[in-house]
Amino acid sequence: MLFRVDENPQTGMWLLYGTILVLAIIVFKLGFARRLPILKAVVIYLFLIFGCTFLTFLGIFLPVAEGLVVAAAILIIYKIRLHRAKKEGTVNT
């Protein structure tokens, strides 16, 4: 299990929650975020924080954090390739 939640529940849950929250924010920023007014952005992030609370409980038994790592890696690779293609001027939309 990630962060050994079964051995040290309180610390493990907080570490799991922090990991899932950070990874969810990274995935959101890389894949879905657009420029929003500050109040709308605050609302979006509050819902993201609430959703990550639920995902943390699922993350005890399911590979939620690991899935977010894979999603973040794929999006990082995509953004790098897109940036290089735009730099070369060969982007087909």
Image (tube, rainbow, N blue to C red):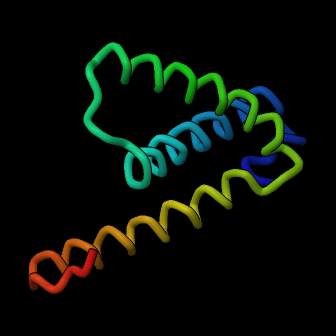
In the rendered view, tell whether residue 30 sits above or below residue 90. above
Quadrant holding the N terminus: bottom right
Q: Residue at x 10, y 85 (%)?
A: 88
Residue 59 location (% of width, % of height): 78, 45
Q: Judge left or right: residue 19 versus residue 27.
A: right
In the rendered view, tell whether residue 12 sits above or below residue 80. above
Q: Residue at x 84, y 44 (%)?
A: 60
Quadrant holding the C terminus: bottom left
> 66 or 39: nearer the eye?
39
Residue 3 location (% of width, % of height): 73, 47
> 83 or 21: nearer the eye?
83
Q: Residue at x 56, y 29 (%)?
A: 48
In the rendered view, tell whether residue 9 sits above or below residue 92. above
Q: Judge left or right: residue 35 versus residue 66.
A: left
Total number of numbered discs in the rendering = 0
Report the residue that reaches farthest toward the top: 39
Report the residue that reaches farthest toward the left: 88
Q: Residue at x 70, y 27 (%)?
A: 53
> 60 or 73: nearer the eye?
73
In the rendered view, tell whether residue 46 sits above or below residue 25. above
Residue 74 location (% of width, % of height): 49, 71
Residue 70 location (% of width, % of height): 58, 66
Report the residue that reaches farthest toward the front: 93
Q: Within the image, what quadrant is residue 89 found in?
A: bottom left
> 75 or 59: nearer the eye?
75
